[in-house]
Image (cartoon, grey):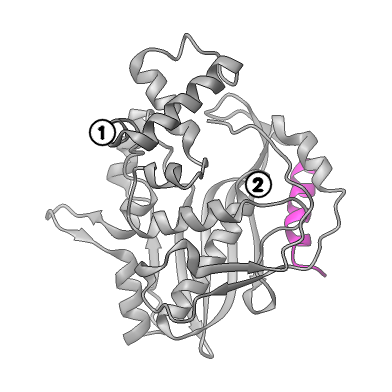
């Protein structure tokens, strides 16, 4: 069986459950609770082929996470639009303009384009409006403690892989309870981390990674998450002198938004094609020194992209 069939099966399973629930966005979802898929990374890079996935955005976002940046100017300058709508919505609300611009109207789209262009050229404006709060990179690399110091979870994992590779403590949490409460109460930053906790595991000289994702938009973002954590596993393995093993993806609330049903049904008509190969610059051994040009995807032959609105 082609490994991508696991993802297609998950889409179909959610459609077939007929469990509809409202959510914080007001769009509504159909969801299930608890699921797992896994990919052997030695058999190809799990970049889905039944629709085109934006690999450039995945690579840049992962570099951004690892750098512990929470201001998305780096992404904007590299034409990665993944987080644009979060920041723009925050800007509109803070300036009182959210009532003037109906969401996804032509006026809203034009205003967001102008906003993004200003971010590219005005560093002070970017600092003021493009910080997403204490999200992924902050927690991975600079978790603050009550004693006032910070913990670099990613560096700690690298140290443990080098000195005690069979440790059962090789994990990284994005769920900082104290700061999560701040995010929830503020409501003007990005939501609390959806991909919440991940753990590394070494066996027979191979590195595997398991992700627990508390909330998963299975059509729009799960393909990104699969590729991102597969790539992170490859990068950590190379930095640690290990071969690659598996990426295991475990879900909590895994859902399809009500306004994605047509897109999902279209994707389910597609037959998976062979996974591509991801090549990483073999000279790079420093996890924090990777740049976009260190990655090459070969043999990627997907179906065309399938667009869908983001629920913010």
Residue 94 at x, y percent in the picture: 34, 19
Please state the horizontal and vertical placement of residue 65, each as a whole percent of the image.
Answer: 40, 55
Q: Judge whether residue 291 is colored magenta.
A: no
User: Residue 45, how many percent across, how many down?
Assistant: 65, 69
Residue placed furthest toward the top:
100
Q: Residue furthest left?
A: 147
Disc 1 marks which residue?
A: 124
Report the side of 59 relative to 47 (left or right): left
Q: Quadrant of the N terminus?
A: bottom right
Disc 2 designates what residue? 218
Q: Is residue 214 visible?
A: yes
Is residue 268 toward the left or the right of residue 120 in the image? right
Circle 2 residues within 10 Å: few <14, some 14–19, many ≥20: many
Q: Is residue 15 magenta?
A: yes
User: In which image quadrant can residue 301 be found?
Assistant: bottom right
Does residue 109 sit above or below 37 in this rendering?
above
Magenta residues span: 1-16
Residue depicted at 83% across the width and 48% down the height: 268
Mark earlier in primary sequence (1, 2): 1
Q: Nearer the viewer, residue 33 or 188?
A: 188
């Amino acid at each position: 069986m082609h490994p991508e069939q696991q993802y297609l099966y998950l889409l179909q399973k959610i459609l077939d459950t007929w469990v509809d629930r409202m959510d914080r966005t007001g769009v509504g979802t159909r969801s299930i609770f608890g699921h797992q898929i896994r990919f052997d990374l030695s058999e190809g890079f799990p970049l889905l082929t039944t629709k085109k996935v934006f690999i450039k955005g995945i690579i840049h976002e992962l570099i951004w996470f690892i750098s512990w940046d929470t201001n998305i100017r780096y992404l904007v300058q590299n034409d990665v639009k993944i987080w644009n709508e979060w920041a723009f919505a925050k800007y509109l609300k803070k300036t009182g303009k959210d009532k003037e611009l109906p969401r996804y109207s032509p006026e809203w789209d034009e205003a967001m384009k102008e906003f993004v262009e200003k971010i590219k050229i005005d560093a002070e404006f970017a600092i003021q409006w493009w910080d997403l709060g204490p999200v992924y990179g902050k927690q991975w690399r600079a978790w603050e403690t009550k004693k006032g110091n910070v913990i670099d979870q990613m560096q700690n994992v690298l140290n443990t892989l080098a000195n005690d590779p069979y440790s059962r403590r090789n994990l990284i949490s994005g769920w900082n309870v104290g700061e999560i409460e701040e995010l929830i109460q503020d409501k003007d930053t990005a939501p609390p981390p959806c991909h919440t906790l991940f753990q590394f595991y070494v066996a027979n000289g191979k590195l595997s990674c398991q992700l627990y994702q508390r909330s998963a938009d299975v059509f729009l973002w799960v393909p990104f998450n699969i590729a991102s954590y597969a790539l992170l596993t490859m990068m950590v393995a190379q930095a640690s002198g290990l071969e690659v093993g598996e990426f295991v993806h475990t879900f909590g609330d895994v859902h399809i938004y009500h306004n994605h049903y047509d897109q999902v049904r279209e994707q389910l008509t597609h037959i998976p094609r062979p996974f591509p190969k991801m090549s990483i610059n073999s000279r790079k051994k420093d996890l924090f020194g990777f740049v976009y040009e260190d990655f090459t995807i070969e043999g990627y032959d997907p179906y065309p992209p399938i667009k869908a609105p983001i629920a913010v």
